[in-house]
Amino acid sequence: MTRPTDPRILPSDITRSELFLNRRRLLELGVAGAAFGASGVNHLALGADAPPPVDRYKAPRNAAFSVTETPNTLEEISSYNNFYEFGTDKSDPAMNARAFKPTPWSITVDGEAEVKGSFTLEDILKPQALEERVYRMRCVEAWSMVIPWVGFPLGDLIKRFRPTSKAKYVAFTTLMDPKQMPGERDRVLDWPYVEGLRMDEAMHPLTLLAVGVYGKVLPNQNGAPIRLVVPWKYGFKGIKSIVRISFTENQPRTSWSGAAANEYGFYANVNPAVDHPRWSQATERHIGGSSLFAKRQPTLPFNGYASQVASLYTGMDLRRYF
């Protein structure tokens, strides 16, 4: 399951993370001091006592699901983001998410499942064994990063909710709070942000619910306190700040396919043979180090994860279902 080192990404191109891991900068990024907990929600049978507040996760690296390229630095990961709830420029989320409060937090589970209700974040996290996975991430704007996520397989959580035979898809919803998320005051998208996966995609062991990065809790601008990570798809599938998980029989509406269906398909698999109408997806630029002047490199089918996930789409026309 391990993908070999991509020789086009050199360690010398990446600034060392320790240069940026100072306390003052972490506080500015909103990394430190995230606590979990909420009142007035159903614990059902999912959790017991809440874990104490943390600012760091002890999560061993899962080598079976990690690429061997050198990760981007925390600074790069947390300062160049797409998170339209905080603004449309890449630098907006780091600036506008500083006052965002990812605690207390709860997630509503509904739809075609036997176990439903509202659950605190500690309900979600308590039984999970967190691990670090280094994933290569690809954005539809033709840039990429290598990110050490901390999280757990989405499929492990789905099993706990016992979806029924009618559950063919899993839908997700982001928090709607224009007071905290100033980008939601603009009609760039039809808020709240929504996304979805087919059930077999959601259950694939590569699909991750991330709660941290570089061993730290997620910075606000990266989707605190919990977000989706699907490394063989374009970045807009990775919905952030999740407050609802719904099991549906029919393919759910998604924000970007609803806004521009000819540009952003439901599946969003990285496919260098299918161009965005306004630019080519055949090559990409790796963000980090001297990347501004770096030579573009070929985009890999399924972002390099073809050996793991291509079988999910056997028989599908990937130009039609893009």
Image (tube, helix red, strand yellow):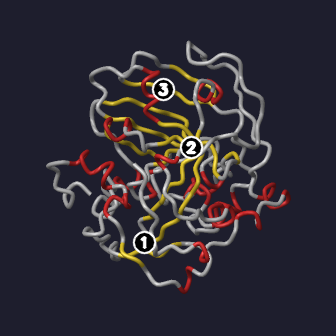
- What is the quadrant of residue 74 in the picture? bottom right
Tag 3: amino acid: Val
Tag 2: amino acid: Ala
* Residue 175 shows up from this direction: no
Q: Which mark is residue 109?
A: 3
- Determine the secondary structure under disc 3: strand
Question: Is 5 situated above or below 206?
Answer: below
Of labels 2 and 1, earlier in sequence is 1
Q: Which mark is residue 210?
A: 2
- Determine the secondary structure under disc 2: strand
Q: Position of residue 72 (x, y in %)?
A: 60, 65
Q: Are marks 3 and 1 in contact (CB under 8 Å)?
A: no
Of labels 2 and 3, earlier in sequence is 3
Q: Position of residue 228 (x, y in %)?
A: 50, 45
Query: In this figure, which residue is indicated by the disc labeled 1?
Result: 142
Tag 1: amino acid: Ala
Q: Quadrant of the C terminus?
A: bottom left
Q: Position of residue 115 (x, y in %)?
A: 45, 17
